[in-house]
Image: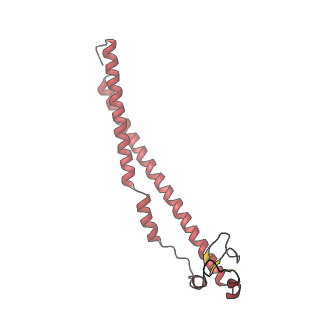
Amino acid sequence: MPAKRLLGIFLRLSVVVGVIVAGATFASMYIRHRNFVDNQIEERLKLHYALRCAQRLSDDILLRHEEKPAGRNIDLSKVGCSDSTYWTNLFEIRAAPEQPRIPTETFDVIYRLNVDPVAAVAGGILSMVLVNVLSLLLVLLRGIAMWIIGTERA
């Protein structure tokens, strides 16, 4: 098989590898971002519902669970409003909104930081270059081997 034909095959192969690498990189970034956002939303909702639960309790009950060394803070898990520890105070409990606030603009900024299409394309181009360099090296080694053996056509 002539070297020119081999290089053509490897060039097409490098394009396929580059597209696969870029797509896989982008998909991985997106999945990681979605998991991060889902975890953040879940945590914010847990805190919101814990604060709303604490709003239904009287100040006397809340103040009984106040931690003096912690600076007049209340652990919501000790008053039965949460499974995990959330430290808060009476002001935050009373100021909790009716609906959970989930700032989507924050997640848009995080999306731009976590999901970078330029990095995915750069990874694809880098893999294309790597496949092409390896193919040139293979064709060069094949030519040297043919020269050593004494075959006229490389």
Q: Position of residue 60 (x, y in %)?
A: 70, 88
Left or right, 64 with respect to 98, comes to right
Q: In the displayed image of the protein, which residue is found farthest to the front? A: 69
Q: Nearer the viewer, residue 16 or 151?
A: 151
* Image quarter (top left, top right, bottom left or bottom right) of the N terminus: top left
* Image quarter (top left, top right, bottom left or bottom right) of the C terminus: top left
Q: Position of residue 71 (x, y in %)?
A: 60, 80
Left or right, 140 with respect to 30, comes to left
Instruction: Give the quadrant of residue 57.
Output: bottom right
**Residue visible at 37% across and 49% down in the picture:** 121
Colour convention: secondary structure
Q: In the displayed image of the protein, which residue is found farthest to the top? A: 150
Instruction: Give the quadrant of residue 108.
Output: bottom left
**Residue visible at 36% across and 48% down in the picture:** 122
Instruction: Give the quadrant of residue 129.
Output: top left
Q: Position of residue 135 (x, y in %)?
A: 35, 31
**Residue visible at 44% across and 62% down in the picture:** 111
Q: Is residue 25 above or below residue 34?
A: above
Give the mark count: 0
Left or right, 140 with respect to 89, comes to left
Q: Is residue 24 above or below residue 94?
A: above
**Residue visible at 41% across and 47% down in the picture:** 22
Q: Position of residue 109 (x, y in %)?
A: 42, 66
Q: Nearer the viewer, residue 99 or 96?
A: 96
